[in-house]
Image (tube, rainbow, N blue to C red):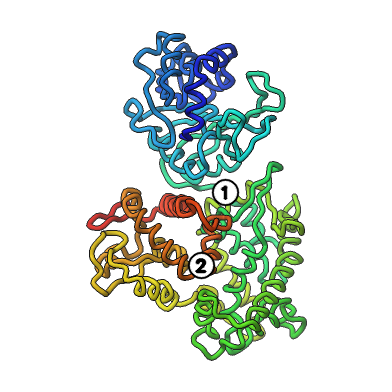
Amino acid sequence: MDPKTLAFYANNAVEIAQRYESVSSPVERYYAAAFTPGARVLDIGCGSGRDAARLLAGGYDAYGIEPVAALRTAAVAAHPELTGRIADGALPHAGDAFGGDFDGIVCTAVLMHLPDTELLDAALTIRRLLKPHGRLLLSIPASRSETLIQDRDAGGRLFSPVAADEVSLLFERLGFVPVGRWDSEDALGRTGTSWTTLLFERKTSGVQRPIDQIESILNRDRKEATYKLALIRALAEIATQEARSAAWFANGTVGVPIRRIAERWLLYYWPVFSHPTQIPQSRAEAAGGKPLKFRSALSALMEPFAEQGAHAGLTSWHLARTSDQLDPVTRRRLELALKSMSEAIRSGPVTFSGSGLESGPVFTYDARSRLVLMPTELWREFSLLGHWIADAVVVRWAALTQQIAHRQGVDAGDVLPLLLAKPEAFRSTQLARDAYAAARVCACTWSERVLDGSFAVDHAIPFSLWGNNDLWNLVPAHPKVNLGKSDKLPDPHLLALSKPRIMGCWELLRDRLPSTFDRQAEGLAGERLPATGPWTEKLFSRFREAIEFTALQRGIERWSPGISRH
């Protein structure tokens, strides 16, 4: 937990305990809805012991953990029945907390005091302490009246700006199901302060939700071109691979930068445009009419690379851009292509997707922020099932192309490989390979085995899962270790052990390829990396998030040298 926040509570423990005890528990009214009679319940951050005492009085087998010794003392003094039931402990790492295996957890006004880089660990700890089908009752601020400076109040306490919808999504991605949500005024009567209370149940298996709205866009919307499918595919991939690129708003919407979508469109349409015979991507094109809005601009960008390998030099283009070797003319062509694609996205699928729904179109565009906006519920679907959605869209895209281009004799089987084409993995790792060789990297990232001049470049998140060749995802490994890891994800313990070496690789790569590394890492981090400071810590927390979410949602085998498990 944040040290300055702990210091505030330790220095003001007596006053704080008295204040808490002076009012009723704001979440007590939800106990009956949250927990079964006699349930074993843990109060995380139990403070003065008020909530734990009320749970015990209500017939629950209640326990509490609290990191401030003075508050633990005050809790037992005010509620002697809690003797032996309160222990030292705090998120994000709460230890075993009375052996874990709880039927329920209460976590009131705690998550707001954690840096956002610790939220994943906190959620994983809560998940570990709960039984399958256990319930989690938590509250976070919905609004606060006081002025914060760098997310801290006048007393130095940290108040991380975490939205209730974002917290809900975090737990859903870890296998929790939302059960209830309530908004309430502040129990202490502070003007301008209000709270949101969330109730979840931990599931025993993977997260599955209905995606009727997305399915309707894919199946029922009229499609004059492949634009809607390209938009859905891009959003699904961004949600699962670049989730931090999204901006959350208090009005219940999420925004995705239109440039991020256009960047993915470029990689989708390049192989299709590279086919020797033009493959129409709209009904108008198929009938000999107006071409796609960006066909001319993208074709001009592809022209210099056309003879440089498969799919009109897709890999050569990718390497040239990754290594910042595009000449001024090609850079201008790139910007024109992305601008043309962005306009096609805005005026086409963003405007018309959802026309087959009773509620009407589901996306809007904010010109000032250049964000594509959608309801948080829709973004949740992309985040939870994005890998399934993306795969389904590719198949539908191939089938729609066959339908559009039937006069040209185009078959879905011919289109599918083009939609799945990516820059060649081995050639795309060459930049990282050259950087590690020049630096004479001598230890395997995963095993610390000596690299005696020969090493493999491993995709930390396997290429087969994400198709990602970004520098942050490429680490040096002993060839035998790399072979053993294959398409598995490193297990949590291995990640912790390998953290210094991974961050060392990032520092090396950023030093040698600063603009490329920063551009690629921004997609993972959701923001530009600072030039100085603990940027590797922030990036590593996002890296861990990506691995943990991918493992849990897709059931990917975890691995460490000599060990592999589910």
In the image, residue 454 above or below residue 208 = below
- Label count reads 2
Instruction: Indicate left or right for 514 with 497 as reference.
Output: right
Please state which amino acid type lies under the numbered disc 2.
Pro
Disc 1/disc 2 C-alpha distance (Å)? 42 Å
75 above or below 140? above
Query: In this image, 20 relative to 561: left or right?
Result: right
Choose between 8 and 374: the one closer to the eye: 8
Q: Position of residue 257 (x, y in %)?
A: 66, 59
Q: Residues within 10 Å of mark 1 (few under 14, many from 20)?
A: few
Label 1 vs label 2, nearer the camera: 2
Q: Is residue 111 left or right of residue 182?
A: left
Residue sticking out furthest to the front: 532
Say which mark, if any, is on residue 210.
1
The answer to whether one can see residue 391 in this image is no
The residue that appears at 59% across and 51% down in the rendered structure is: 211
Q: Nearer the viewer, residue 406 or 68?
A: 68
SS for callout 2: helix
Q: Estimate the x, y position of residue 533 in percent, counting from the top left.
A: 50, 52
**Neighbourhood count class around disc 2 (C-alpha, 10 Å): few under 14, some 14–19, many 20 upward:** some
Res. 321 image quadrant? bottom right
**Residue matched to label 2:** 514
Res. 73 image quadrant: top left
Up-down relation of residue 224 to residue 109 (above or below): below
- Where residue 466 appears, as percent x and y from the top left, is 46, 64
| Label 1 vs 2, first from the N-terminus | 1
Please name the amino acid that badge 1 sits on.
Pro
- Above or below residue 231? Residue 321 is below
In this orientation, does residue 346 appear?
A: yes
